[in-house]
Image: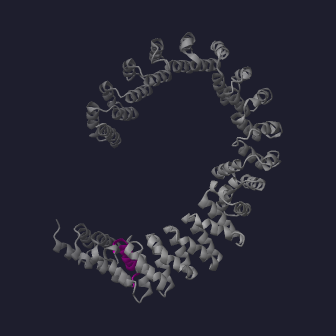
Amino acid sequence: MPDVKEILEGLRSDDNEVLREAAFQAGELDLKDAVPLLVGLLETSNIGVQEAADNALRRIAGPEAVQSVIPLLRSENAPSRNMAMDILRVIGCDDLHAVFGLMRDEDPDIRIFAADILGTTANSLAVNPLCNALLKDPEVNVRYQAAVSLGVLAMPEAAKCLNLAMGDEEWVQYAVIEALAKIKHSSSVDALVKGMDRSSDLVASMIIDALAEIGNVKAVAMLMRRIPDSPTALANKIVKAVVGILGGKALTMLSDHDRETLRLAMLKAVEDEDEEVQDAAIQGLAYLGGERASKAIIGIAAGIDRDLNQERLDEIVGHLANIGLTEAIRSDLDSADAARAEVAVEAMGRMTDPAVPRLLMDAFWDKDLNLQRRMAWVLSKLAGPEAVDFFLDLFARHTDGKVLKSAVKYCSEHKVQQSLDSMFALLEHKYDDVKEAALEGCVTLGGPEVTARFLDSAQSRDPMQRLMAIYAIGKLDARANIQTIKQALGDEVPDIRKIALEALAGACEDDRESRELLIAGLEDENSEVRCAVVEQLGECCSGDVVPHLLRALEDGDDWVKIRAVEALGARRDPQAVAHLAPLLHKSNRLIVLKVLESLGEIGGSAAFQTLIDISNCDEPELVRAAEAAMERIQEEQGSGG
């Protein structure tokens, strides 16, 4: 341990390195005898020495440190003065009375510093001297800082003096209002509202924001009374505050007179340049409703750039939908303005009104392709049996892939058997996404005829048709059509063999034949097929697949090995540890990392010991992976115990 005398001598040295080290040691030892010397070092020109002294004083703290640092508040050296302020903000609470004394200083700057420091003490004893300064100090900047500090403390007992200070000059009012918003005391609502009578528009605007922040319902009636006589900008602010306090649904509980007053104010507020005000007005109108509201909201939504602000647009469209199917929506569905028509369709897509599907179907063929795509998608989600003929007509007349995908979605979900020919025709579409949608649609439609068609397609000379057929048969009923699946396992196209193996996977647990066919795939000449087999075996709950996964660790393809390692880790079978450990010496770094990860999943003493051995190697990446795996084992053992 360093000698105290040596540390104090070091703090008097002319060598900066010695000074820094001595300051550090003084802080470590909480050496209060060093405080005067450390304070003196705050005025040196060497930044490193200053920082060391600063840190030491913060660690030592206590009344002696507070009293010793306070004189630096009068220093002509700005950096030293600022450093003293920073220190006192941290340790000033150790001697509040010393700081209280500064509140009576003749120098207003010192009183400002003291008020600032008291705001960081988190002590209720600081409230009274700050309130006294707020209400009585002759210097406006002291009163301002006192209000700021009371806001930082955010203690309810300060609300009373802050309320009284609402009559101060504007500069102080700013800080008072912000402080009251932080404290959120109900007694401040009346004081803030009354303060609006004698305030500038700027202060009144701040008061409205503060009332919204406080969120007390009793402010609503007071604010509502001020709407008719307020300038537009303030009335718009009031709208935002009222909606913020009440929320949307509660607006419907206002009196008829207040609802109408607020609705008219909201219709003006949606034109405000501030998006937050606009959004609050839109939220309110969503519950107060009306044709004018619907029309105004559509106008706002149509002007939003989808690429830049999709989230806001979605929210506004949701509010528009909440109003319901108005004449404004109907009219804009037929608008020549594409943006307005699109908003109308988006909103209708979120409504439950039974009239919506018929309106969309009647308007469909007159719209451009982009809007038709959206309308078809909305109808695929909303429409009921009344839309069967419409979607069958889409199959017959339309060529756009996205529109046809919506038709597939509707007809498959509604089991429209008349669409079967059209869906199968789309299996030969030029776009893969349309083929995929049609394939899933056929599977969803299901039934003997669908199965029969796919069994026929499984014999096609076209590899893509065979692939889709085997996929569908696997989804529909692989076990009942096992002979077709077996045939596909010998297909010349590896992807078809993979799909056939995946079709078997669902039956591997309770069907021995399917499991044996799947295991036989480990001998496939194609490594991707073997990878697929290993993945399927890994998901099979049957215990007798483990030996085959262990055999896959010896595969000549590294990716097959990796998939086997992952599968064994997921199964958490302790017997795998002895087979995984030798792979830690492979040159393929990914294999080694995967093995370490799997050992962590498997757990147990054998896996842990293997990981300990690796953690002593000189390769940082492997050490980190081994440590992470060991940590997992320890955590799981702890939670299990």
Quadrant where the image shows the N terminus: bottom left
The answer to whether 434 is drawn above or below residue 619 in the figure is above
Residue 272 point in image, percent of width and height: 70, 64
Q: Is 142 a magenta residue?
A: no
Quadrant where the image shows the C terminus: top left
- Residue that appears at 68% across and 71% down: 226
Location of residue 512 (image quadrant): top left
- Which stretch did the figure color magenta? 76-91
Res. 354 in view: yes
Residue 621 point in image, percent of width and height: 35, 42
Magenta portion: prevailing SS class: helix
Q: Is residue 617 left or right of 365 when viewed as pictured?
A: left
The answer to whether 505 is drawn above or below residue 229 in the figure is above
Residue 602 point in image, percent of width and height: 34, 31
Residue 129 point in image, percent of width and height: 41, 80
The answer to whether 483 is drawn above or below residue 7 in the figure is above
The answer to whether 628 is drawn above or below residue 605 in the figure is below
